[in-house]
Amino acid sequence: MTVIATDRSHLWHPYDNPLQPGPLHVVREAEGVWLTLEDGTRMIDAMSSWWCAAFGHRHPKITAAMTDQIARMPHVMFGGLTHAPATTLAARLAALLPEGLDRVFFSDSGSVAVEVALKMALQAQVALGHPARTRFATVRGGYHGDTWKAMSLCDPETGMHGHFGNALRAEHFLPAPPITFGADWPEDPAQNGIADLEALLTRHGAEIAALILEPVVQGAGGMRFYHPAYLKAARRLCDQAGVFLIFDEIATGFGRTGRLFAMDHAGVAPDILCLGKALTGGHISFAATVTDARIAQAIADAPPRIFMHGPTFMANPLACAAAGASLDLIAEGHWPGQVAAIEAQFRAELAPARHHPAVADLRILGAIAVIETKAPLDMAKVHAAARASGVWLRPFGRLLYAMPPYVITPDELSRVNAAMLDLLG
């Protein structure tokens, strides 16, 4: 049987009909920004394979680190054991993050990192003498993953998980932050969205364990960019209400917005931080939930005195090695210039989209470009165009976007931009 025929007989694909799935491309290999199909066709991976391959596919430094690690110890359980790849990586992450964020819990995917953060917040609140704090708050237009509790914090109406309905516990949802990134910040709380947050915490703060936000960039929930001042106000109000603040930086961490972390645009830190995707340069699934000594101490002091989570592949040495090599690439310091150049080229070459009759909005920040159309895109047309244009794009709904690897060249990025404009018709 061919790869496609076998796929059709056995496999499910993400967000697709399990029995009548959409069209597929068979990828034979990937290197740098390029995907090579089984017939030799090459396409630029303008998606960084769902935003994780920040330094390109099969980066020699990351693959070398993984090859060395797999020859010695691909995996060992983390219960009762430890190893240098995990301890070294944790220390390096703590050195990169705001002071105090230095207690690291490793897991195997971003969605699980969010689940860990929520459990961490709830267990700490109970330990601190607040057993009623079992609810969570967030803003509309967000996305935090596909696992069960994470789904309950995705937008309940416009999000992809809304059809699970009453099976998901209803949490507290605020309007999406209304002031866009780069706009003037109005001081009036009724205009900037802070009045809604303050009112929620005043009414329901005693039952809320944590507020979770994607800082500055809302990802799969709508690809919106909002003003960093919202984060500053959220930090202040959460402190006043005794509510923990969680930042989900799974999509934005490690340079994607032009800063090392999106929270750096605001200069504030959360109580709990979720990282993933580009943590390993997209070479293997891995994630981290990072918190501070206060939360760790609270959990340690109250029965059962242990944190109730433990993935089988927690702190996988192979993933730790990949992440260490990815941090080496961050430390080399090329990414800020690369991301700034990508942003400038996006702005110059995608400018015609602003005046296209099919376009509702054009949004650009760092190495992210989003064209929001007035009507949903024809996915079959987009898929077919990938071979002809040599550019792999995978929009959702009315959002046509690109998040290319930072190592993309100007000529390659011009091909991406041309393909995006061509898809508008």
Image: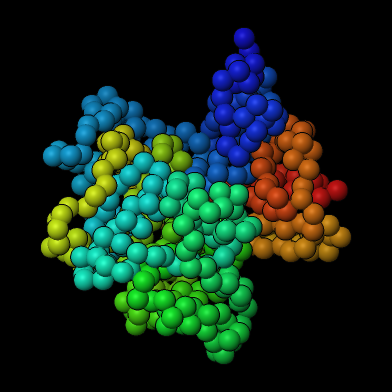
Quick one: which residue is furthest to the bottom in this view?
Answer: 188
Location of residue 359 with respect to 33 vertically, above or below: below
Q: Residue 315's x, y, as percent?
A: 27, 41
Q: Residue 311's x, y, as percent?
A: 29, 40
Is 200 on the left or on the right of 385, as rendered?
A: left
Foreground residue among 32 and 150? 150
User: Which residue is found at the position 57% from the left and 37% from the top?
Assistant: 14
User: Which residue is found at the position 66% from the left and 42% from the top?
Assistant: 394
Visible residue check, residue 81: yes
Q: Residue 145's x, y, as percent?
A: 48, 50
Foreground residue among 192 and 53? 192
Numbered marks: total: 0
Is 402 on the left or on the right of 275, as rendered?
A: right
Visible residue check, residue 339: no
Residue 217 occupies quadrant: bottom right
Q: Quadrant of the N terminus?
A: top right
Q: Coloring scheme of the render?
A: rainbow
User: Which residue is found at the position 32% from the left and 56% from the top?
Assistant: 119
Foreground residue among 303 and 233? 303
Residue 118 occupies quadrant: bottom left
Foreground residue among 258 and 201? 201
Quick one: which residue is furthest to the front in this view?
Answer: 166
